[in-house]
Image (spheres, rainbow, N blue to C red):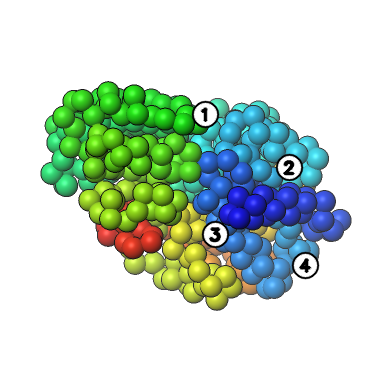
Amino acid sequence: MKKTTLGLMAIALLAQTSLAAADDVKIGVLMGITGPLASFIPPILNAAKLAEKEINENGGILDGQKVQLVVADTQAAAQPAVDAANKLVNIENVPIVTGALSSGATIAAANAVTIPAKVTQISPTATSPAMTDMKDDDYLFRIVPSDNYQGEVLAKIVQDEKISKVAITYVNNDYGVGIASTFKAAFEKIGGTVTAFEKHEDKKNSYRSELATLGSGGAEALVVIAYASGSGAKIVKQALEGGFFDRFIGTDGLRDDVLIEQVGADALKTSFFSSPTSPEENPAADKLHAAFTAAFGEGADKPFVDQSYDVTMLAALAIEKAGSTADRAKIRDALREVANAPGEVVGPGDWAKAKKLIAEGKDINYEGAGGSAEFDANGDVQGYIGKYVVDGKTYKRIAVFQ
């Protein structure tokens, strides 16, 4: 039933690309509706739709036009992401794109489509360090920290847990390679030992031979850097079944309810996870979560809800600041102007206020649910990393690092 529902949702979402009225202002949205990130999508998409709704109910965009999100499925893979971006940019003629979610899809879409077309692209979730030094002419941004930072934080978390020896398995893509390498370097730098460092492919039925090798070096825990709906949950389950490991360390890709559903909370009680998150005390997040819960009932605490809402608002604010959809370079430059200080602070639910300030020629500074999106010269942000543990049927954040 779950797969059928997701499939129907994907068809409905993709059908939206032909429903926009002629005077709507389109924002392209690259999401992994199908593929290994599918289980993450519903709340992430709901957050973007909430931003769209708030904009349209509070004066609309530019001269009162409606914002229309045009969603395209990347399947969290490189070539489908290129195809999806081509559709958004060259057929739908969107002036700005949010997404993609996975690093590989984001990089592929940017290199092949959005950068050459000079269309600004803002990812809410892509973390690969490779994005930092891409030659993008300032058309590629993200509002989560690079894995260079998450790797360092995770290494410190592992050390604080008094774990000195780990084995690492990572999915063979931009996301897995990037964060595995940065974590390994950071962990060894602070005195930790990596007993095994092995990549794996995403769609195998069995990982038992790899696990036998990983488990032979006396590691105290297995670091699994993968998507739970891809290889991640399967690796954890087979590691437990084979007695190879009983403690696991994961990053954001593993922080998925699918892992708990397939493995069970009891089996994960000593495990922990890192993930980009929001500041510990943030009224902007509280405001968004209240609105999200009122609109959808649940899901406000799911991964990347805050960031999905924020990139949608930032994309719309950049268009509003630019004054039209025609000048793509102006939209690119306007993104920094609305996101970075100085300026009067606006946040979730403040579209009408922001629109008025822009009309008056005043500077604004969007402070989001996910924190400040202060872009550096590479389009990166510092951001926040949370430590999570399993709490019943979901995950509980127990610490925040900046």
**Which amino acid, mark 2?**
Leu
Image-based side of 118 in relation to 146, left or right: right
Are discs 4 and 1 less than 8 Å apart at CB?
Answer: no
What mark, if any, has residue 290 been given in the picture?
Answer: none
> Residue 348 placed where, x, y %?
53, 67
Q: CA distance from mark 2 to mark 1?
A: 22 Å
Q: CA distance from mark 3 to mark 1?
A: 30 Å
Which residue lies under the disc numbered 2? 88
In front: 200, or 398? Answer: 200
Q: Earlier in the sequence, mark 2 or mark 1?
A: 2
The structure residue drawn at horizontal position 52% and vertical position 29%, both measured from the top left corner, is 134
Are discs 2 and 1 less than 8 Å apart at CB?
Answer: no
Q: Earlier in the sequence, mark 4 or mark 1?
A: 4
Q: Secondary structure at mark 2?
A: helix
What mark, if any, has residue 134 been given in the picture?
Answer: 1
**Which amino acid, mark 4?**
Gly
The quadrant holding residue 354 is bottom right
What mark, if any, has residue 43 been given in the picture?
Answer: 3
Residue lying furthest right in this view? 22
